[in-house]
Amino acid sequence: MEIRSRVGVLLFSCSRPYSAVECVEAAIKAGVSLVDADLCAWDLSGAKLSRTQLDFVDLQGALLAGADLTLCSLKGAKLNRARCASVLLDGANLSGAELCGADLSGVYARKCLFTGADLRGALYDKHSLLPFDGIEAERLGMILKQ
């Protein structure tokens, strides 16, 4: 398994058959920067990525259920259509990130920064803890799941 930048540059190669989570966690442990990494459609369910710099990372269509992204920097990240059920995002910086159509059901993002983020069509539910109320969520184009 290989982690590449969005322009195809090899960032990290796993030497044995790792799961996506193991590969990303091994890259972080090895000190590899994942800024601008292409993790599009990867299954990172349950990944422990707190305090990781993930600016401009491509996570479009990724499965992030139960992942810990507490205090991560995700500035300019692409999370369109990502499935983020029960993700911990408290203290994360998602300034300028794209989350169009992302499923944010049950996320914990009470102290998350969404300045300039595109949340059009992002789903949330009554269990989602966001730094703004339902009126603001609607103004931002988010959709409440029933």
Image (cartoon, rainbow, N blue to C red):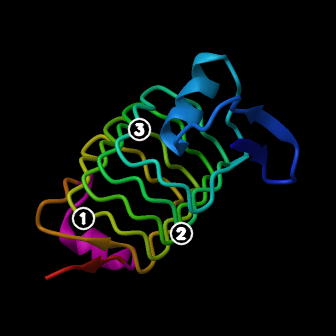
Gap in angstroms between the C-alphas marked 3 and 1 = 17 Å
Question: Residue 140: where, in percent of width, then height?
Answer: 39, 74
Q: Which quadrant of the view contains residue 35?
A: top right
Question: Residue 17: where, in percent of width, then height?
Answer: 61, 38
Mark 3 or 1, nearer chain start: 3
Residue sitting nearer the eye, 49 or 77: 49
Q: Which quadrant of the view contains residue 105?
A: bottom left
Q: Residue at x 68, y 43 (%)?
A: 1
Q: Residue at x 29, y 40 (%)?
A: 111
Residue reaching furthest to the front: 16
Q: Residue type at mark 2?
A: Asn
Q: Is residue 69 left or right of residue 86?
A: right
Q: How many marks?
A: 3
Mark 2 or 3, nearer chain start: 3
Q: Which quadrant of the view contains residue 134?
A: bottom left
Residue 30 falls inside the magenta stretch: no
Question: Residue 70: where, in percent of width, then height?
Answer: 36, 33
Q: Which residue is mark 2?
A: 80
Disc 2, SS: loop
The label shown at residue 105 is 1
Q: Residue at x 64, y 42 (%)?
A: 55
Q: Nearer the viewer, mark 2 or mark 3?
A: 3
Disc 3, SS: loop
Looking at the rendering, the stretch of residues picked out in magenta corresponds to 130-141
Gap in angstroms between the C-alphas marked 1 and 2 = 14 Å
Residue reaching furthest to the top: 30
Q: Which residue is mark 3?
A: 47
On screen, 49 above or below 111? Answer: above
Q: Residue type at mark 1?
A: Ser
Residue sitting nearer the eye, 72 or 67: 67
